[in-house]
Every structure is written in structure tokens, then in C-alpha cells.
Amino acid sequence: MGCNQAIPNTEHEASVHAPEACLFFARAPQDVTEEELTALFSEHGAVEEVSIYRSWPSAKTSKGCGTVQFRDKAAASAALQALNGSSNLPRLEGPLVVERMDPRK
């Protein structure tokens, strides 16, 4: 799933599900949970969805990356500024990478 949203039907939906409200993260611990990521990112605004990339759906460990969909662009911007390069997750071996999601990738 992740940040691939349906085309919005209204202006309100466009602001709520704007691609700018989606962030990509990398360098998270392989055993990180959606709950840990939701807790971390929600300190900066309402998180609608966290998707952790895994080698296969039933894999217990992740690739250490994924996406976070925020309710609005302002929350995503606040999280990006606060968390990129941070070490706010337990078990991190280096700084967390947080970027705007590029829908073309």
C-alpha cells in the first residue's frame, strides 16, 4: 500500500491525501514495528498509515525502509525537519533518513 492514494474527488480530499503528505524513511532497524514508527512520527502530526517494506509479506524483518502517510502536508513537513538525520529510534545503527516521497519512484 503506502502512499499511493486514489485521485481525490474534492478539494478537501486533495489537501488531505496530497503526495506532499507522504514521507519515505530508510535506515530503520530491521526489526522496527509499525507501532514504533507510528509513535515516533505522530509526535509531529496525525499519521494515517505506516508501511514497512519487507522482502515478502510474511517476513518478520524489514528492509529498514518504508513510507508514512500523514493527514496533512504541515505535519509531514514538521516530521521531515525533525526526524531526518535523527537517532530517535531504539536500535538505530546510524541516523534515520527521512525524505519526501517521490511518486515517480
Image (tube, rainbow, N blue to C red):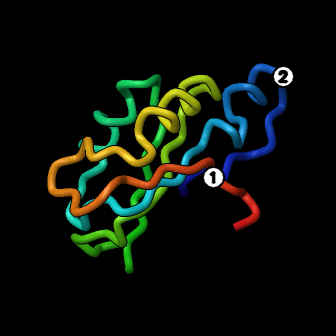
Identified by mark 1, the residue type is Met
Q: Secondary structure at mark 1?
A: loop
Q: Residue at x 35, y 25 (%)?
A: 43
Residue drawn at x 48%, y 50% as measured from the top left: 98
Looking at the image, the residue that sits furthest to the bottom is 55
**Relative side of 97 to 72, left or right:** left
Q: Is residue 22 above or below residue 10?
A: below
| Res 101 label | 1
Q: Quadrant of residue 27?
A: bottom left
Image spot of residue 105 (x, y percent): 69, 67
In the rendered structure, find residue 15 and report the number of the disc placed on it: none
Question: Which residue matches tag 2?
Answer: 11
The percent coordinates of residue 80 (x first, y second) are 51, 38
Percent x, y of residue 41: 38, 35
State the separation of the CA atoms marked 2 and 1. Answer: 21 Å
69 left or right of 88? right
Q: Earlier in the sequence, mark 2 or mark 1?
A: 2
- Mark 2 nearby-residue class (10 Å; few <14, some 14–19, many ≥20): few
What residue is drawn where x is 74% and y is 26%? 15
